[in-house]
Image (cartoon, rainbow, N blue to C red):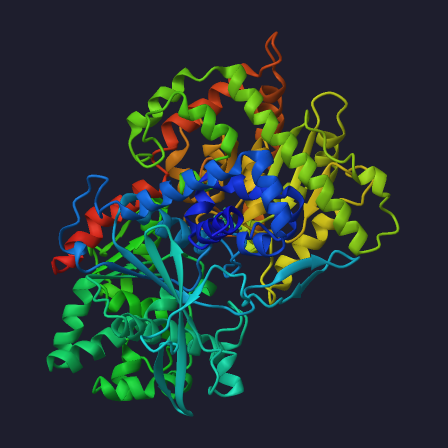
Amino acid sequence: MTPEMEIREKLNELGRNLWWTWRPDVRSIFRDLDPRLWQEVNHNPTALLRDTPGEVLVRRAEELGLESRVHHAFRRLAEYMGSAPGDGGVHLGPLRVRPVAYFSAEFALHEAVPIYSGGLGVLAGDHVKSASDLGVPLVAVGLYYSRGYFRQWLDREGWQQETYPEVKNPDMPLELLRDDHGEPITVALETAAGALQVALWRVRVGRSDLLLLDTDVEGNSAQDREITSRLYGGDHRTRIRQELVLGVGGVRALRRLGICPGVLHLNEGHTAFALLESCRAQMEDEGVDFPTARDRVSRQAVFTTHTPVEAGHDRFEPELVEEVLGGLRKALGLGPEEFLGLGRVDPADRGEAFCMTVLAMRLSDRANAVSSLHGHVSRRMWRRLYGGGRGLEVPIGHITNGVHVPSWLARPMHLLYERHAGRDWARRSYRPEEWAGLEALDPGELWETHQVLKRRLVRFARERLAEQAARRSDPEASMARLRTVLDPEVLTIGFARRFATYKRATLLLDDVDRLARMVGKVERPVQVVFAGLAHPHDQGGKQYIQRIFQLGRDPRFEGRVVYLEGYDMNIARLLVQGVDVWLNTPVRPHEACGTSGIKALLNGVLNVSVLDGWWAEAYDGRNGFAIGRGGSHADPQVQWRRDAEELYRVLETQVVPEFYHRGPDGVPTEWVQRMKQAIVTLGWRFSSNRMVLDYLRRAYLPAADGISSGLV
Ligand SMILES: *Cc1c(COP(=O)(O)O)cnc(C)c1O
């Protein structure tokens, strides 16, 4: 093998395990090969290598001393993969032989694998990565959306348009699973219209595997091939069929591969059919009846609920349930009404639709919400399901979400922290001691590192805005002017998330004149960067985007309020690492947890947030800023006005003055103290390693041991 071939092969292999995505030293190898191309291929190693000719590879390898870096990275990967389960010192009990099966409708692992829509996917992706880092045996199960979610762009009026590019292509770091004869492994599902074949793909996420199910298989009808084409895209019928593939197909896939899970973790209600199929499998394998099978499966099941918003819970009409699940129902030996009752709060109420959350809660001994406040809300919300009555203790606990530190922490910050934190700091990020040393960070150095990231964001934003304007052939935008938008010295507010209306992206725009005064100040001005996707059917969310877009054309805001199109993990990373302030304005208590603010705090970006979700338990008065005091009002308009007033007040009286209050060295001393307070006291609490360990101790181990009715 020539040295070129060897390097190419090793790089290809590195690219095929998503471990590289959270290893800054490996990321930089790909980037350094060809920074332009790396950006153009959306950070996809396979595409990068395909488009890099042999002589370029050889030349760059020599220039960069790449050979040794590649060999070193390759050895590190082999070491990582070779380390034993539980090597982090965690007790795994029966999970050593029977792993956790983690079901989710979406996984956000990296921008190059666009099969996610937002926070739920990011949470799932971070969970899988942390399980890998901690050595917790886990197999994740999801769907391979051949056209993903959608790519967002705005037309000249600022109205969101969606295109669905082909996601399924040979550049994806996915491997089709084949049997010993080289034939694709498939599992079959019976439907009213006949059998349906599902193909299986594997994504390597460090030591964890993610199995993706795919109905785009030759032999299936044209309609069936489309089932897994779009995430959250279709009508009710497509949706329930997707959930059939995910839940029932997922359990069959595990069985087909000889994986016998000790725990079934259901991430949100979309996945609940996995429990029914597990019951069926128990009945078939052990010859037991449904109540016995149900009891066994419930003990193994852990269900995580993610939203108190009504529309976030899937509900299906009885006819549709019977059409799609009639076969499974019969196999379970249940009558139609008995079956439907499993998905109803009141099983006897024939007017009640079949709810996936109810099904999941009925069939799981362990259920949890994703923040302390969300726990309270969920217990109130589901009281009736557990019999109502006074003094009832509703068995829903909470495990607060976290984020995967190595995936979201900027490399310059990482390098800075590493000098003060413990050596194995990234993996042991759940321990407060590992972060305590960061108290000693030099304020000037922390501030300068932040400024580097801020300038990087500004450069990126200018380029993006110019591209966006060019695509719209914007008559008004002069390209030259676009290249000077945003000032890295100005207090920069970031807001980026799904444009679900409860998140109230336009709260900051409530009093446009007041905002204009803040933005237009000669001394101590502010600027705002927005990004985010509205669901294709969400007209309200699209109107919010349009308002922000149009505000950016108002001369008072030009170049100071900007909207970046096509929000994805890449833009998310740049924003949470590069702005000064992260704004979060949900209607309390509708944000179950929220994770983007956690990503921000890791990087020393201060949160300005309604006391909702994670922030309600994180805010201590010295680690960021609160909007209001956690009150709520039954009338949403009153609540809106109040929160807007509180938002302006905190910005004008606290955030702006503190940010611009500089010491003789130009460093905002109190501000940097707040950054440190947030990093040191919150970094470990909201890391996904802490979260996965909580699941391990409070849910996975008792479930794998078959202990019934543990409160999470
Ligand atoms: C983190 C993240 C989210 C979640 O943000 P929230 O604040 O929890 O709404 C959504 N989308 C992307 C791309 C993210 O990276």
Q: In which quarter of the image is residue 61?
A: top right
Residue under the point 34% across and 22% down: 436
Between 579 and 467, the one lying in front of the other is 467
Counting from the top left corner in percent of width and height, residue 455 is at 65, 30
Check the image and name the residue furthest to the top: 664
Check the image and name the residue furthest to the front: 1
Q: Is residue 177 above or below residue 675?
A: below
Position of residue 374 in the picture relative to residue 287 (left or right): right
Q: Is residue 59 above or below residue 121?
A: above
Position of residue 387 in the picture relative to residue 489 (left or right): left
Q: In this view, does 248 lie above or below 605?
A: below
Position of residue 547 in the picture relative to residue 705 (left or right): right
Counting from the top left corner in percent of width and height, residue 324 is at 39, 84
How many numbered discs? 0
Counting from the top left corner in percent of width and height, residue 47 is at 58, 56
Q: From where the camera sits, is residue 646 visible?
A: no
Q: From where the camera sits, is residue 206 visible?
A: yes
Counting from the top left corner in percent of width and height, residue 336 is at 29, 87
Position of residue 263 in the picture relative to residue 660 (left or right): left
Check the image and name the residue furthest to the right: 475
Q: In which quarter of the image is residue 486?
A: top right
Residue under the point 36% across and 34% down: 426
Residue under the point 78% across and 55% down: 471
Q: In this view, does 382 lie above or below 444?
A: below
Between 104 and 270, the one lying in front of the other is 104
Q: In which quarter of the image is residue 656?
A: top right
Between 575 and 46, the one lying in front of the other is 46
